Amino acid sequence: MEFSAKLPKFLKNASYNNPEDKENSPWKFTTGNDLAYFDWVFQPGNEYQAQAFHNHMEFKTLSKKLHETVPVEEILGNSTNEDIVLLVDVGGNTGLDTVRFHQAWSKLPGKRIVQDLPATIDTLDRDQLKPIEVMGHNFFTEQPVKGAGAYYLKMVLHDWPDKQAKEILSNLEAAL
């Protein structure tokens, strides 16, 4: 049975409330899959779906960028230390936003890091992203990069119930 045919039953079972836990999601209910969507989509055999997801994420970056709308130099430009971490793109997918940020602000010192699940990071061409660093990281675990100038989350928190969104933010708060 297709997703759209099973969704009404999921919603009725949830009393038409938003899910409060990632383990009880419309995705899992309607597909009968034990994996969360982001774990499933990057499994071997799902390359077509993974590429479609990457394409969707690239399309969603066509609008005006955050670094074009905020005073980046005023917020992040007060260091001359090349060894600092200027920006961590948490859940950054293919790194497109970080590449564009670096192109616009290449004179600002500091490292730029794109983090995503290891399965996503493993698909990236690291040479094409240089000098941007890539790091496999699950944002439900402790943030390994401490004291960065900025932790950037774009199109991340809306994918998760409040409980998990708070967990993601708590891991970042500890790193601040």
Image (cartoon, grey):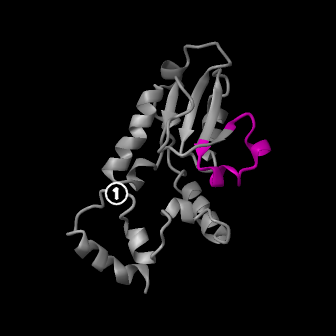
Q: In the picture, which quadrant includes the N terminus?
A: bottom left
Residue 95 location (% of width, % of height)? 63, 45
Q: Which residues are magenta?
A: 115-133
> Is 129 part of what is drawn in magenta?
yes
Q: Is residue 42 left or right of residue 72?
A: right
Residue at position x 43%, y 83% from top?
A: 2
Q: Amino acid at mark 1?
A: Asp
Query: Looking at the image, which residue sits at the far right?
Result: 127
Identify the residue position indicated by label 1 in the image. Answer: 21
Task: In this rendered view, identify the residue nearer to me: 67 or 26.
Answer: 26
Under circle 1, the secondary element is loop
Q: Is residue 16 above or below residue 118?
A: below
Residue 18 location (% of width, % of height)? 27, 61
Residue 52 location (% of width, % of height)? 60, 66
Task: In this rendered view, identify the residue nearer to me: 137 or 113.
Answer: 137
Q: Residues within 10 Å of mark 1 (few under 14, many from 20)?
A: few
Q: Is residue 51 left or right of residue 125?
A: left
Residue 159 falls in image quadrant: bottom left
Q: How many marks?
A: 1
Residue at position x 45%, y 49% from top?
A: 156
Q: Is residue 35 above or below residue 175?
A: below
Q: Is residue 173 above or below residue 23?
A: above
Q: Is residue 35 above or below residue 74?
A: below
> Is 24 part of what is drawn in magenta?
no
Query: Looking at the image, which residue sits at the far left?
Result: 15
Residue 53 location (% of width, % of height)? 57, 62
Residue at position x 50%, y 29% from top?
A: 150
Query: Looking at the image, which residue sits at the far front?
Result: 34
